[in-house]
Structure formats: structure tokens, C-alpha cells
Amino acid sequence: MLAIVSLIASIVGFIGILPIIGSIGAVITGHISLNQLKTNGENGRGMALAGTIVGYVGLAFWIIGAIALFSFIAWAASQSSGYTYSS
């Protein structure tokens, strides 16, 4: 059951409905699900693994996007305007 939750949360986080929360939830539930599947021997390892991987990829994209955004803001703030005003 947690494997399905992990996969759905990773998709929700990846497409941007709940960007960071969905990805973090997918990673956490994916790891819990993988641990439970290892001890119980049930099916669903592929979904749990896919949810965990997509969750990590979604987190990486959001972190890279945030770094790029803040870098652009810092670059734009450091640019001086070439306009001179005379009255």
C-alpha cells in the first residue's frame, strides 16, 4: 500500500501540484515501503522503487531550479543601469 502512496506522491511532486512536499513524502514512504517489502516478502517493490527514484529526481529538479532562480536574481541585482538622468 505504501508503494502506491510513494508512486502517487512522487508524480504529484514532480508535476508541480505539491512540489517539494510531494517529493519528500514520496521519498519517505518509498523507503518505508522498501523496508516493509524486504521483511514481508510482498509484491510492489517496483512501484516503491519508482516512487523513491522519481521523488529524488523531483527534489533535485526543484533544488536546481531554486539555485538557478537565486543566481539569476543575484546577477540581475548586481547589474547597474546604463541610463543617466539629466534635468
Image (cartoon, helix red, strand yellow):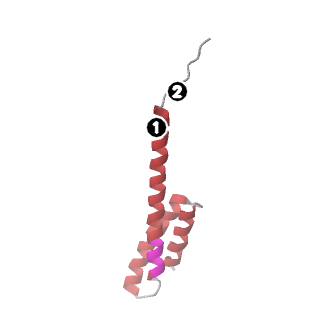
* Residue 60: quadrant of the picture: bottom left
Relative image position of residue 30 (x, y in whole percent): 45, 73
In the picture shown, does residue 78 fall above or below 10?
A: above
Specify the quadrant that holds the C terminus.
Answer: top right
Instruction: Inspect the image, locate mark 2, and give the three-letter code of the amino acid beneath it.
Output: Ser
Mark sitting earlier along the chain (1/2)? 1
* Nearer to me, 4 or 76: 76
Q: Secondary structure at mark 1?
A: helix
Q: Residues within 10 Å of mark 1 (few under 14, many from 20)?
A: few
The disc placed on residue 81 is 2
Relative image position of residue 76 (x, y in whole percent): 50, 36
Give the residue drawn at x 51%, y 58%.
20
Magenta extent: 46-52
Q: How many marks?
A: 2
Instruction: Inspect the image, locate mark 1, and give the three-letter code of the amino acid beneath it.
Output: Trp
In the picture shown, does residue 72 fall above or below 82?
A: below
Report which residue position mark 1 lands on: 75
